[in-house]
Image (cartoon, coloured by chain):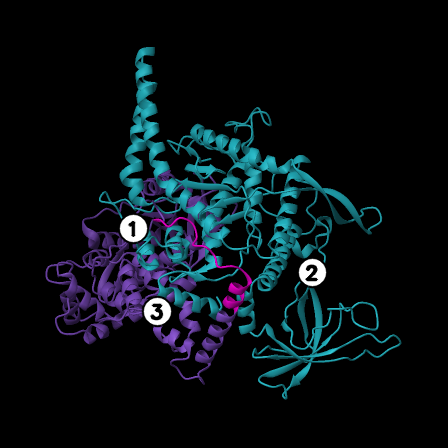
Chain colours: A cyan, B purple
Amino acid sequence: MSLITTLARLEAVRTGRARPAATVRHRHLSDRPLVFVPLTTAGEAGAPLGALVGTDRDAPRLLVVPQPRDRDLRFAFLAELADIVLPHLESCADVVERAERAETDPGTGKRVTVEVDLCADAAQLIVPSRAGIDFVRLLGRSMRFRRTAEQDPEAPYPAPPRVPLLGRWLTHYAERARVPGSSLLLAMTDLLGRHWATGQSTLEDQHLGALLAWIDPPEGMSGAEAAERAELARDPAGQLLCPPAGPATDPAFDNRLLAPAIERYDRARAALAAAEDGLEADERLGAVTAAEREIRALVESRTRPTWDAVWRGLDLLRTLPPGARVEERWTRDRWSFTGHRDRVLAGEPPQPRRDDAVTAANKLAAREREQARLEAQEALDDPLVMAGRRLAGEAFAGEVVDVVMAYSEGKRPSPRPLVTVRTDDRPHLGERAKVYRSLDGRPQTAEFVGYDEQAEGGVGVVLRIVDKMGRGKEPAAGSVPEKGDRVCFTLFEHEQRGGAKLPDPERTPWTHGGPPGEPAAPEAADPVTEEDLL
Amino acid sequence: MTAPAPAKSRAWAALAELRGPGVPAKALDARALAALAANPGCRRRAILDGAGVDKAALAGALGSPPAFGQSQFAFMRGNAFEARVKADGGAELLRLVRETLDPGAEPPARAEVPDLSATGPQGRVARTALALREAAGTGGWTLLDHPMLALDVAGSPAFLEPDAVVVHPDGGWTVVEIKSFPVLDGSADPAKVGAAARQTAVYVLALEEVAARLAGQGTAPRVHHRVLLVCPKDFSNLPTASAVDVRRQRAVTARQLSRLTRVEEIARTLPEGTCFSPELPAEELTAAVDSVPASYAPECLSTCDLAFHCRARARESGAVAALGRPVRAELGGLSSVEDVLAAARGEAGDPDDPAVAALRRAAALRAEALDAARAARPPVPPAGPEGDPCH
């Protein structure tokens, strides 16, 4: 956290309201995001209890597993989830535009441009908190190796038809969420925490209710009071007024409300199973339905406040104008979405449990590159982020006080103008260090020449502009800053180059386990035991 | 073993006075002992734990009850899994121990599972020690199911109950911890594994005390520093085991425990008649608690019963530490919100102090950036409908 954000937090403490930590929105927000508010059963590795899901804030779909230990009920939940999520994903996957992509021709080894499909939009999934992202990953892992009756008639507990496919998509989304700056799957707490600084610690910011309370406290309350109320206040029955955003539930809720309700449901079902004639069964079925309705109401009461909070968070974020380079990053998300769609269409097996060495190295390299890209782009989009980089000596801004025309030596002299920038910043400039500024959205490079101590009122940094001035002897109009211009140069590059290319998987060096050998048979499903979960 | 020196009875009486008349000492369990390592600098926690004060009751009396609790679902699942792992006289468990830690040893075809029941914790401790001594000579496998160990903590014994201790044929001892969080594709939640390792380290320390006593009688059993963590595999109920090296956690906890003897020192600095009995009125209690300095950090919220009280006090006093340790570290010698803001505004502080100079630059840059952004677009209308975040 930079000192500037720390300062914003302290201001928030004093004013009792969150302060801006960004002046633009740094993440893409879809017009029609799919919001997913899941709950899980405490102590179980992956037994969902219920969820609210949907794209319409006024009409979420409520899914409930009345007895989380019952495999059939869990499958019913997952099938229902698939019926909501997959059509939404497919509605995006079906609309494509033509795009060009550079590929290596397998025959000649040359780089060629090929025309491919690119999904015009990708589906965006929003969960309340970071734990929600982990839960999406867990759900994906639990489903993608499942076999349906069609795939494997011998499977002991066949999964409903579309469940494995949902598992693959959720796995892809969770994996993509690890790429810095990606927006396919976002956690609302991360989104809000990126754009506002509250008067509490980042740890406490993980509580969605408390975070929103700081950003937009109710009338007549300070952010601190409202946040504390959201965290701790309980009703006379001992239940939290603001239930945790999940997927974990409050133990008091589990013990006092949920456990008795599940017990009633179990009893009603046992009674139904023991019914001796149709009339009795009808009556007892009514009891089961009533018990189920009770659990549904409980789950809705714990998810609905979070659902509303997520949408309120979206409202707040939409008040910020999007950063100029957000769209470009979203295009990368669309490529990622399209890539997964194509892998599914091509009939590839589900993502393996463990990546091979080359895939893992590629993923890490991509995340590092995207992290650097995100840092550079956020700074270029947002003066507040750039201020942090200037404070750290990684950028400087100032006024051009002098421009002297100069030329390179050689047969065809090119313009190499010397520009003096007066600045109060203290950049860490080494000898002949390269610095960059954004010229119509493209980086222009300059070289650090030295300091001009004579510049009035501050330090003068003398730079030699070296590119983006056209081919002529005279620099193209507007390509060289003029005296009096405000300019901002960065010491970091604006565009990230890909690192060294990694070998093909077949050429994995022995240090990394060697080539994977024969393509292994598709990974087996998890073995099932009588009482296992998912 | 750096066992704390046995406290003198006078010191013990002084600590009992802190609890209040007739209030029994709350025994420390392994979780509480492990949590000490999380915030070693906190004198408040040291004295309250050392004196055996029930912090949860104290926090309740102060008006900031702790928000911990365990769901009965998690509790039931944990018990069911443990029972499954230990079924059949621990056959599966011993197989896992041998396979993971001692593949050279003979297979545990039949193992001793001594009965450890006895009256009272002291009795169970004695019974456990006896069983451990008997097991040393057998040259076979022995499984101690829920043994009871005692660890001397600042003069008062803490009774600890590991899930199991296994005696190897070569006489070595291994602590087994059974947890119900899953190991998914070979990896588990690092935070949970870390907590389990810290907890197990306390058991290792307690076993080493037993071993030291036995050594005086001729045999010197070895306590393994690699413990066995047993968890459900993937989404199933099948157990999978991993060896966890707890040397580092053991060293940290040992150091913390030896430092706990300073509890007496802290007690001496308290005003005469200080008492933490939950029966006292809230103002008196608040004054008593405030007489010992705490070092609050947001991490306390997940480990300490008293954290909400300490947080409220830290916020009231405007301590920047309430915003997290990194924030405090960044601000140098400035420790209160008002000091920092005044320094940033240029109203206070020494401009030659690098922390103050950096703050002023940060404040200027932040103001400049916000002004630029404001100039670039019309003012934002108030966001969304004002309302309660939850209703």
Residue A17 position (above or below residue B356): above
- Residue A434 at what x, y percent from top left? 69, 73
Question: Can residue B370 be found in the magenta stretch?
Answer: yes
State the separation of the CA atoms marked 2 and 1: 56 Å
Q: Amino acid at mark 2?
A: Gly
State the separation of the CA atoms marked 1 and 3: 25 Å
Q: Nearer the viewer, residue B30 or A249?
A: A249
Q: Chain of mark 1?
A: B
Q: Amino acid at mark 3?
A: Arg
**How many residues crowd around disc 1 within 10 Å: few (fewer than 14), some, or many (20 or more)?**
many
Which secondary structure lies at badge 2? loop
Please give the residue where the numbered disc 2 appears in the rendered image.
A499
- Residue A250 at what x, y percent from top left? 33, 45
**How many residues crowd around disc 2 within 10 Å: few (fewer than 14), some, or many (20 or more)?**
few
Whether pointer 2 and pointer 1 mark residues with C-beta atoms closer than 8 Å, the reply is no
Between marks 1 and 3 in the image, the one whose residue lies nearer the viewer: 3
Are both tags, 1 and 3, on one chain?
Answer: yes
**Quarter of the figure with residue A479:** bottom right
Query: Would you say residue A148 is visible in this rendering?
Result: yes
Give the residues drawn in magenta, as a range: B369-388
Residue A406 position (above or below residue A533): below
Which secondary structure lies at badge 3? helix
Q: Which mark is residue B147?
A: 1
Please give the residue where the numbered disc 3 appears in the rendered image.
B255
In this figure, what is the number of numbered marks? Answer: 3
